[in-house]
Image (cartoon, rainbow, N blue to C red):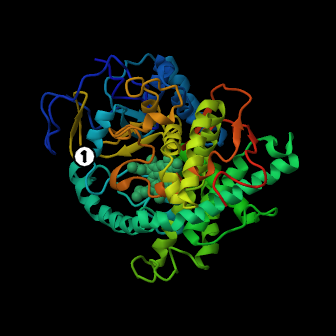
């Protein structure tokens, strides 16, 4: 029986669907007791490093999708970071390459000290989410948590989680999971419900959409000015070819600050502040240094003053200090009339912690899908025109109301979903089921890290017709988003809390210019905790209308 449909080999992504493996789950998952008649997935296994190297050795590595390779390149990242165990790693690498090891026998896979079961079929993913419990948990980003502990900062909702998976007393995962989830989970839930009210509910969207619309218009004006100054062609249809990423970063940061702190920080001015530039640099550094630190004990690296850890901690320090500037100023979430502080519902240290996490989580995650979406629209001119027409009509009918305009343009939302299907920012969504579950005839014990692998899911022929085709209309029909196929923002109570902000930012920014690319070749990607283009795409922007108008009426 092939394991490939249910299992992938890395902690970060999975294999494309295996058409030979369509067996449905047999029998139900049976509470917390053992389920009989299914193959067991053991709790403990062989050394993670050896497993990792064994897969490599056996050529299984070659079957992995290219993004798996990026993940496996973690070894190189570590080495480039002058990690002091480099001699040890190269020794174990060469040792294991010269050993003949038996093929993997369990769907539980190891990467370093982490182990996971990786799945990709929507039915299995549904079963996973049905077992997530009231206080769903993701894998803890230990380096981030270590930074908070070292600096004595509080944790926001992203990091509020359980650390211990296996009970230190008797080694039973189930007991420990239940006890800890109840205590820590309740804290997460309370904070999360408050944040939902501020940024997820439709009343919140109504509040912040005009702010984002204002920033999107400023971005368009900035680009218009650039095109007028540096572009070529006739007045009404001037073009400029450029890498828009630096401006997209500024847009995402300016927009997040405006929504979260109620402040414009002037990033579109000719002289943006040095602090903001440093913040953008710090978020990138923090993301790039996180993956290798996930597989090594951050506390040890901190004690050894390893450069990788020092860079990581410095990057977080900058991110925190950026937030502090605003915490003293007016902030929508913190000191506004009907704010969390005024209502006395969340102490200041937790407001700070959450705002910092929201800021750190909200810049690259928006910039990257924008890069991919602009690229895909540019290389699919037919799609671009169809979506633009709908957006234009919708803005005309909405009479300046951005919420109505976005609602009237389903293809625009489809463009965003299609972009995230092909390029999910986070390539997996993780959960620790609170009860045993059975997937593809394997019993997976409660408390196992199970990852839904979004990258291969989005490109699987078993799940999507013509998956290689960029087709926003595939999301248009009734129920087309259902069935655990569109999961870029996660799912359920623990889904992305910045989702509504991100969706609005992305939709407001696309399609204000005619877009072209010189080559329709696929973009190479790299993995730095989020999936990014290896080198940012260069796009030709052409003005659509005379003057500074955008599609959205002024
Ligand atoms: C396209 C952009 C984005 C994508 C694809 C994305 C994706 C995700 C995913 C997959 C999760 C985990 C969800 C789960 O486990 O079910 C998550 C969590 C989170 N995201 Fe996002 N995100 C995006 C933008 C943002 C933005 C703009 C912010 C902040 C303004 C943000 C803040 C957060 C936070 C704080 C969490 C943790 C929530 C919790 O654990 O309760 N994200 N995001």
State left or right for residue 74 relative to residue 492: right
Residue 194 location, quadrant: bottom left
Residue 344 location, quadrant: bottom left
The residue wearing badge 1 is 131
Check the picture and name the quadrant holding the N terminus: top left
User: 99 or 108: which is nearer to us?
Assistant: 108
Element type where label 1 sits in the image: loop
Is residue 113 depicted above or below 159 in this figure?
above
State left or right for residue 483 relative to residue 84: left
User: 134 or 7: which is nearer to us?
Assistant: 134
Identify the residue at image location x=81%, y=54%.
Answer: 225
Can you give x and y, in whole percent of width and height, for residue 400 in the image? 58, 61
State left or right for residue 178 relative to residue 339: left
Can you give x and y, in whole percent of width and height, for residue 43 in the image? 27, 38
Check the picture and name the quadrant holding the C terminus: bottom right
Can you give x and y, in whole percent of width and height, for residue 72 in the image? 53, 32
Identify the residue at image location x=30%, y=57%.
Answer: 135
Number of numbered labels in the structure image: 1
Can you give x and y, in whole percent of width and height, for residue 217 in the image? 67, 58
Asked if one can make out residue 528 in the rendered structure from this viewpoint, the answer is: no
């Amino acid at each position: 029986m092939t394991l490939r449909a249910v299992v992938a080999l890395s902690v970060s992504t999975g294999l494309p669907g295996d058409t030979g493996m369509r067996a449905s789950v047999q029998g139900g998952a049976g509470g917390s007791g053992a389920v009989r008649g299914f193959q067991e997935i053991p709790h403990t296994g062989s050394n993670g490093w050896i497993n990792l190297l064994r897969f490599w050795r056996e050529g299984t590595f070659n079957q992995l999708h290219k993004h798996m390779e990026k993940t496996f390149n973690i070894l190189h990242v570590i080495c480039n970071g002058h990690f002091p165990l480099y001699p040890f790693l190269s020794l174990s690498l060469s040792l294991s390459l010269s050993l003949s090891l038996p093929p993997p026998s369990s769907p539980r896979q190891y990467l370093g000290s982490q182990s996971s079961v990786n799945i990709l079929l929507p039915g299995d993913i549904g079963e996973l989410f049905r077992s997530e419990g009231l206080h769903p948990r993701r894998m803890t980003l230990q380096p981030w948590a270590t930074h908070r502990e070292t600096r004595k900062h509080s944790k926001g909702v992203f990091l509020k989680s359980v650390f211990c998976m296996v009970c230190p007393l008797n080694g039973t995962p189930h007991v420990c999971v239940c006890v800890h989830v109840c205590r820590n989970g309740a804290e997460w839930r309370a904070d999360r419900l408050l944040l939902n009210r501020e940024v997820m509910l439709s009343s919140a969207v109504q509040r912040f959409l005009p702010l984002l619309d204002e920033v999107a218009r400023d971005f368009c004006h900035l680009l218009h000015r650039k095109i007028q100054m540096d572009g070529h062609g006739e007045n009404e249809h001037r073009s400029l070819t450029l890498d828009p990423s630096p401006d997209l970063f500024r847009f995402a940061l300016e927009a997040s600050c405006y929504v979260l702190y109620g402040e414009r920080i002037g990033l579109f001015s000719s002289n943006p502040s040095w602090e903001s530039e440093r913040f953008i640099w710090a978020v990138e550094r923090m993301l790039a240094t996180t993956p290798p630190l996930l597989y090594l004990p951050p506390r040890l690296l901190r004690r050894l003053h390893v450069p990788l850890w020092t860079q990581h901690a410095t990057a977080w320090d900058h991110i925190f200090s950026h937030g502090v500037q605003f915490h003293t100023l007016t902030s929508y979430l913190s000191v506004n009339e009907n704010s969390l502080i005024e209502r006395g519902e969340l102490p200041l240290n937790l407001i700070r912690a959450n705002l910092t996490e929201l800021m750190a989580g909200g810049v690259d995650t928006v910039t990257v899908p924008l890069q991919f979406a602009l690229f895909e629209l540019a290389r699919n001119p037919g799609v671009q025109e169809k979506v633009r027409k709908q957006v234009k009509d919708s803005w005309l009918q909405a009479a300046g109301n951005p919420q109505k305009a976005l609602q009237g343009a389903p293809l625009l939302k489809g463009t965003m979903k299609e972009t995230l299907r092909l390029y999910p920012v986070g390539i997996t969504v993780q959960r620790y089921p609170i009860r045993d579950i059975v997937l593809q005839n394997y019993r997976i014990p409660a408390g196992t890290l199970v990852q839904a692998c979004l990258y291969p899911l989005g490109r699987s022929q078993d799940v999507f017709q013509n998956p290689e085709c960029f087709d926003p209309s595939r999301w248009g029909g009734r129920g087309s988003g259902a069935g655990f196929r569109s999961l870029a923002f996660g799912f359920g109570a623990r889904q992305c809390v910045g989702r509504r902000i991100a969706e609005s930012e992305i939709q407001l920014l696309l399609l204000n210019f005619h877009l072209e690319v010189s080559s329709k070749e696929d973009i190479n990607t790299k993995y730095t905790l989020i999936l990014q283009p290896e080198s940012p795409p260069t796009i030709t922007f052409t003005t659509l209308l005379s003057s500074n108008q955008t599609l959205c009426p002024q």
